[in-house]
Image (cartoon, helix red, strand yellow):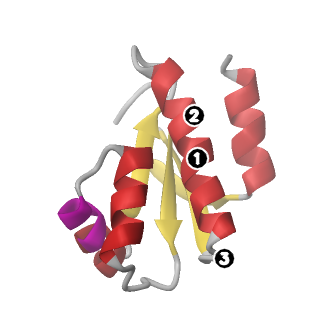
Amino acid sequence: MTDSPSLAIVLDSRPDLPAILLKELYGVTGRSSDELHRAIAAGAPVYSAELFGNDHIEVVPRLEKTVAFCERLKLPFHVEETYDGETEVIGLDVMRNILDSSI
């Protein structure tokens, strides 16, 4: 359980992305292509980040770039917020409000 909320991007349709797109997503998330492939296949987050931590300045752009990647490719996805051990699906507008309030 953390004191700080975390946000995660999950691909809904579990697509089998080609290597070139996994490489592009690696450039956004910093996760290896193998990690990304396994996460997508399992319905796990392709990117997740704790907010308000020491690396906050890096995670906010990565969250936005991951969303932009999904939107550009028309990949269905959702955003999850975890706080105090509870996870819920939130909308993009809520995610952006959280990110705006954190800077």
Mark sitting on residue 65: 1
Q: x, y percentage for residue 103?
A: 68, 16
Label 2: which residue? 61
The verdict on residue 34 being magenta is: yes
What residue is shown at x 28% (from left), y 50% (from top)? 31
Instruction: Answer with left or right where residue 82 lies relative to residue 103.
Output: left
- Residue type pointed to by label 3: Lys
Q: How many marks?
A: 3
Q: x, y percentage for residue 59?
A: 48, 32
Q: CA distance from mark 1 to mark 3?
A: 14 Å
Q: Secondary structure at mark 1?
A: helix
What is the magenta range?
Answer: 33-37
> In this view of the protein, can residue 37 be seen by the observer?
yes
Q: CA distance from mark 1 to mark 2?
A: 6 Å
Q: x, y percentage for residue 70?
A: 59, 66
Which tag, 1 or 3, sits closer to the chain's start?
Answer: 1
**Which of the pair 52/26 is nearer the observer?**
26
Q: Secondary structure at mark 3?
A: loop
Dot 3 crowding, Cα within 10 Å, few <14, some 14–19, many 20+:
few
Label 3: which residue? 74
- Residue type pointed to by label 1: Lys
Quarter of the rendering containing residue 24: bottom left
Point out the residue furthest to the front here: 20
- Residue type pointed to by label 2: Pro
> In this view of the protein, can residue 44 be seen by the observer?
no
Q: Secondary structure at mark 2?
A: helix
Which tag, 2 or 3, sits closer to the chain's start?
Answer: 2
Quarter of the rendering containing residue 41: bottom left
What residue is shown at x 34% (from left), y 36% (from top)? 1
What residue is shown at x 47% (from left), y 25% (from top)? 58
Circles 1 and 2 in contact, beta carbons < 8 Å: yes
Q: CA distance from mark 2 to mark 3?
A: 19 Å
